[in-house]
Image: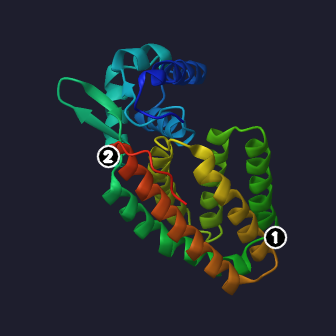
C-alpha cells in the first residue's frame, strides 16, 4: 500500500500493475466462461489489493490475458460498476474506483447492523466456524510479524466476511461481500498500514475468543468499539490524503 504523492510512488505502482497482470494471466478463463466469472476474478483481485484504487483496467489487455471477447469484458465492467467497484471516465476508460469520506460513512452504516446481527447468530453457529475465525486471526498475526500488511488487510476483510456468514444467509453474505470489497478500496490508499491494521489484529482476536466463549454481550461491545474506531481512522485517512496533510492520528 503506497502513498499517491511524491516521486517515490512510481515503482511500487508499476510493481502492482505487473503483479495484477501476472495473477490475471494465471486465471485464464475458458471461452465459454461468462461475464460473471470475469467479474468474480476482477473482484477477487480488488479484494486482495492487487488492483488498487485508481488503477486503469485496459480492455485490450484483459481480452488477451483472459482469452475472452471484448463484449465479455465490457459486461464484466458493467457488473462491477453496479457494485461501485469501478468507474468509467470519458476518454480515459475504466478504472478501479476511489472512495471518499461519504462512501466510508455509508459503508460503515451498512455493515454495522449486519455484523452486530452476526454476533447474535453466533449462538447457533457450528464451533468449527468460530474456530475458523480464530485461525484467520492467527494468519493475520503471522503476516504482521513479517510486515506483510497487505495480507493483514486481506485477512481482516475475510475475518469479517466469515463473521457475517455465521448468520447462515447466502443472500446476506453475498451482499456483504460486495460492501466489504468496497472497503478494500479504502485500505488501498492507507499511507501507513501498520498505524491502522496493527490496531485491529488484537481486536479481531478478542472478538473471536469472546464468541468461542459464548460471551455475546461483551463481543457486541467489542465489535461496536472496533467499528467506531475503524470508521474514524479510515475517514481521517482519506481526509489526510486529499488535503495533503501528513499529520499522524493518535
Q: Residue 152 in the image: x percent, y percent? A: 67, 46
- Say if 52 sits above or below 113 in the image: above
User: Quick one: which residue is furthest to the front in this view?
Assistant: 247
Tell me the residue at 69%/65% (across/down). Answer: 203
Q: Is label 1 in a helix, a strand or a loop?
A: helix
Closer to the camera, 55 or 162?
55
Identity of the residue drawn at 73% across and 62% down: 202
Q: In the rendered image, which quarter is residue 15 located in?
A: top right
In the rendered image, which residue does mark 2 sit on? 243
Q: Are marks 2 and 1 in contact (CB under 8 Å)?
A: no
Q: Residue at x 79, y 71 (%)?
A: 209
Between 226 and 117, the one nearer to me in the picture: 226
Query: Where residue 192 appears, x then y in whole percent?
Result: 56, 43
**Percent x, y for residue 200?**
65, 59
**Above/below status of 226 relative to 45:** below
Residues at marks 2 and 1, CA–CA distance in whole angstroms:
46 Å
Instruction: Identify the residue position indicated by label 1 in the image.
Output: 127
- Nearer to us: label 2 or label 1: 2
Judged from the image, the secondary structure of the residue bearing numbered disc 2 is: helix
Give the mark nearer the N terminus: 2 vs 1: 1
Residue 8 falls left or right of residue 131:
left
Amino acid at each position: 500500500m503506497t502513498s499517491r504523492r511524491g516521486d517515490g510512488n512510481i515503482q511500487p505502482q508499476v510493481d502492482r500493475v505487473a503483479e495484477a497482470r501476472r495473477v490475471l494471466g494465471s486465471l485464464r478463463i475458458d471461452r465459454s466462461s461468462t461475464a460473471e466469472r470475469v467479474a468474480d476474478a476482477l473482484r477477487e483481485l480488488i479484494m486482495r489489493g492487487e488492483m488498487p484504487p485508481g488503477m486503469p483496467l485496459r480492455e485490450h489487455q484483459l481480452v488477451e490475458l483472459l482469452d475472452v471477447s471484448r463484449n465479455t469484458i465490457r459486461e464484466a465492467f458493467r457488473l462491477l460498476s453496479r457494485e461501485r467497484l469501478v468507474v468509467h471516465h470519458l476518454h480515459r476508460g475504466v478504472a478501479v474506483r476511489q472512495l471518499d469520506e461519504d462512501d466510508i460513512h455509508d459503508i460503515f452504516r451498512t455493515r454495522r447492523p449486519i455484523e452486530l446481527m452476526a454476533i447474535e447468530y453466533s449462538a447457533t453457529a457450528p464451533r468449527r466456524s468460530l474456530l475458523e475465525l480464530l485461525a484467520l486471526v492467527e494468519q493475520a498475526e503471522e503476516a504482521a510479524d513479517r510486515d506483510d500488511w497487505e495480507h493483514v488487510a486481506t485477512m481482516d476483510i475475510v475475518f469479517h466476511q466469515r463473521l457475517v456468514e455465521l448468520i447462515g444467509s447466502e443472500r446476506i453474505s453475498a451482499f456483504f461481500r460486495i460492501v466489504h470489497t468496497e472497503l478494500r478500496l479504502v485500505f488501498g490508499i492507507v499511507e501507513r498500514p501498520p498505524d491502522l491494521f496493527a490496531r485491529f489484529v488484537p481486536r479481531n482476536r478478542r472478538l473471536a475468543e469472546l464468541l468461542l466463549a459464548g460471551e455475546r454481550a461483551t463481543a457486541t461491545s467489542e465489535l461496536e468499539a472496533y467499528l467506531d474506531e475503524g470508521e474514524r481512522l479510515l475517514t481521517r485517512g482519506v481526509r489526510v490524503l486529499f488535503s495533503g496533510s501528513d499529520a499522524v492520528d493518535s
